[in-house]
Image (cartoon, rainbow, N blue to C red):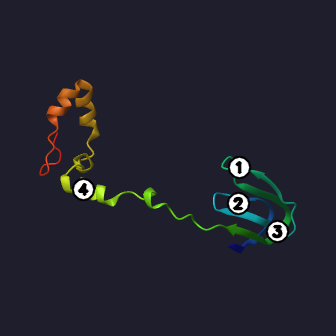
Amino acid sequence: MTYSVRHITNFHYQPAVREVVMEVRVQPRNEARQRCLSFSLDVTPRANVMLYRDFLGNTVHHFDIPGQHQQIEISAHALVEVSASPVPEPRAVPDWEKLDDSIASGDFWECCCPANTRNRVRCWRNSPKSWARNVEATSRNFCSI
């Protein structure tokens, strides 16, 4: 499916400014399921628009508007093609029955422990056996240190 995307930004200055230096990141990226087929950027008052890629891979348009002005309009227009999401294979979906069985058997006690990792680390550094003695895990009393 192809989308036509239009984005307009207006800046109003009171009092008028003498000069503006600006960067905009409005061009759609080409990624897994989307492709930017065309892109245009119009700036009023007229400016010499240049571009570069930032360290994240975004296209950055930058310009300078010298001279006194009270208003700037930036208009971006893009045609973006987006492909459909792939339907996951039935085997790629997690097995919910296994998760239900784990919860029913109580085999998830470590997830229910308080996040007091400082004491656990201290016990573990002293000796793993010491840590094992200090942690009691049952279905009724999940964790105590």
Q: Secondary structure at mark 2?
A: loop
For the N terminus, give its image quadrant.
bottom right
**Amino acid on which disc 1 is placed:** Asp
Q: Position of residue 28 (x, y in %)?
A: 70, 63
- Distance (Cα) linking label 1 and label 3: 21 Å
Q: Secondary structure at mark 3?
A: strand
The residue shown at (25%, 35%) is 120
Which residue carries the number 2 mark? Answer: 25
Which of marks 1 and 4 precedes in the sequence?
A: 1
From this view, report whether residue 120 is shown above or below residue 48.
above
Which residue carries the number 4 mark? Answer: 101
Which residue carries the number 1 mark? Answer: 54
- Distance (Cα) linking label 4 and label 3: 61 Å
The residue shown at (14%, 32%) is 133
Depth order, front residue of 133/88? 88
Q: Are marks 3 and 2 in contact (CB under 8 Å)?
A: no
- Distance (Cα) linking label 2 and label 4: 48 Å
- Category of crowding for the residue at label 1, using alpha-carbon neighbours closer than 10 angstroms: few (below 14), some (14–19), many (at least 20): few
| Disc number lying in front (3 or 2) | 2
Which residue carries the number 3 mark? Answer: 43
Which of marks 2 and 3 precedes in the sequence?
A: 2
- Distance (Cα) linking label 3 and label 2: 14 Å
**Amino acid on which disc 2 is placed:** Arg
Q: Are marks 4 and 3 in contact (CB under 8 Å)?
A: no
Q: Are marks 1 and 2 in contact (CB under 8 Å)?
A: yes
